[in-house]
Image (cartoon, rainbow, N blue to C red):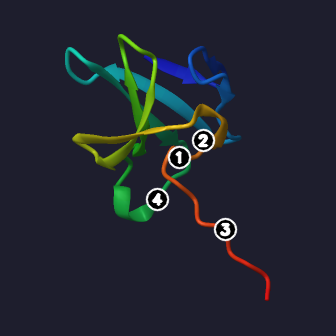
Amino acid sequence: MYHTAQTIHIMKLNAPKGFSYLTEDFNTKYKRVMLVHHANYVYAEGKEVQTVWGFINKKTGNIHAPINAKKPGKVVDKALVTPYTTMPVNEVSQG
C-alpha cells in the first residue's frame, strides 16, 4: 500500500518531495515502513529504489529503528524521527 505525499497516521509525517512510504505487514508483530524514492538510478535498472524507514509495532504503535531490512531494533522516540529515517542521527559539532 503506497502513501504518496500523504501522512502516515501513526507517524504523522509527510513523505519528502520525490518520495513516498510503502507499508507492509512484516510479521504478526510489526509493520515495515519503506521509503520509496521515485528517481531513476542507473544501477537499479528501472526498478524502484527502496530503503527501510522503520518498523511499527502493531499492538503498541511504538516505532523501532531498523537493524537491517529484516530485523527491527530499539524503540525510537517519535519526536526524534525524520521523514527519511528512524535511525538515530548524530549531531556534528561546529568547532
Mark 1 / mark 3, whichever is N-terminal: 1
Mark 2 touching mark 1, by CB under 8 A?
Answer: yes
Residue name at image x 25 percent, y 24 percent? 26
Of discs 1 and 3, which sits in the foreground?
Answer: 3
Residue name at image x 66 percent, y 68 percent? 91
Q: Callout 1: helix, strand or loop? A: loop
Q: Residue flagged by tag 3: what amino acid is it?
A: Glu
Split into 4 quadrants, where in the image is the C terminus? bottom right
Q: Which residue is mark 1?
A: 85
Of discs 1 and 4, which sits in the foreground?
Answer: 1
Give the class, few, some or many, for how many residues have Cα within 10 Å of label 4's Cα (few <14, many ≥20): few
Q: Which residue is mark 4?
A: 41
Mark 1 / mark 4, whichever is N-terminal: 4
**Direction top: furthest residue:** 59
**How far, Cα to Cα, is label 1 from label 3?**
15 Å
* Residue placed most toward the observer, 52 or 90: 90
Q: Which residue is mark 3?
A: 91
Mark 1 touching mark 3, by CB under 8 A?
Answer: no
Mark 2 / mark 3, whichever is N-terminal: 2
